[in-house]
Amino acid sequence: MKEKINLYFIPGMAAGPEIFENIKLPEESFNIHYLKWLTPIKNESLKAYAGRMAEEIEEGAVIAGVSFGGIIAQEIAEIKYIRKVIIISSVKKREELPRRMRWAGNSGLYKMIPTRVVLGIEDFTVFSINSRMRKRMALYQKYLYVRDKQYLDWSIRQIVLWNREKSIPGLIHIQGDEDSVFPIKYIDEAIVIKGGTHAMILVKGREISAILLDIFKDV
């Protein structure tokens, strides 16, 4: 009997394990674990934070991270032996960050983001300009797990200042062609999902599950 694969999912920034509810994988083949965000220590480096996250992961496991979770997954793989890293709706090196994010990091403009105001908003749909955007904002609000200013400020800083120059060998990247956070035009060597937005983990679960199963044939 084939040994079960230990698979650890890391959600996107501020999100909880619930974002993976539409990912369906056979229980007889996988031991699935869902990691939750830790509160960062003051002035904690990305490497140190990833080291604390790595304490919950077994050697030789597979990690699948969404968005900022994909960045964390790559940092964990530098600390602990990971059999395979999969990132979804994310980036694998600094040059894949959109220019606006790189500029925000280089200029320090990211410090001006009013995270305290965002955390105080009760209804994200007030920012919607049409029904499609209203639906998307409602989804974001539903799965917002962490409402902590220290965590959000720290996470935004880590993303815009991330300085990885080369992608991890063997990394698998799944990206939507309508991702507005990490646009596909900046991404290379990815499995592209047509119509996939940055929130596609919520609405393209069947398609992403099929891709994951295909990937695991070789793991």
Image (cartoon, helix red, strand yellow):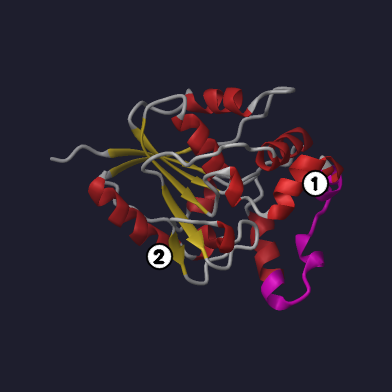
Q: Is residue 28 visible?
A: no
Position of residue 129 measured from the top left corner of the image (x, y, whole percent): 78, 74
Answer whether labels 1 and 2 touch (C-beta < 8 Å).
Answer: no
Quick one: label 2, few (<14), some, or many (20+) residues within 10 Å?
A: some
Among numbered discs 1 and 2, the one appearing first in the sequence: 1
Calculate the distance from the C-alpha at mark 1 to the C-alpha at mark 2.
32 Å
Residue at left offset 48%, top offset 30%: 76
Q: Is residue 11 visible?
A: yes
What type is the residue that disc 2 sits on?
A: Glu
Q: Which mark is residue 194?
A: none
Residue at left offset 67%, top offset 29%: 39
Position of residue 180 measured from the top left corner of the image (x, y, whole percent): 64, 63
Position of residue 110 measured from the top left corner of the image (x, y, whole percent): 80, 43
62 up-or-down from 120: above or below = above
Of the 4 image quadrants, the one containing the N terminus is top left
User: Taking 36 as reference, is 107 left or right?
Assistant: right
Q: Which mark is residue 119?
A: 1
Relative depth, front residue between 30 and 80:
80
Residue at mark 2: 207
Of the 4 image quadrants, the one containing the C terminus is top left
Magenta-colored span: 113-133
User: Taking 123 as reference, is 200 left or right?
Assistant: left
Secondary structure of residue under mark 2: helix
Quick one: label 1, few (<14), some, or many (20+) residues within 10 Å?
A: few
Residue 128 is a magenta residue: yes
User: Taking 154 as reference, is 8 left or right?
Assistant: left
Relative depth, front residue between 175 and 32:
175
From this viewpoint, which residue is outermost toward the left? 1
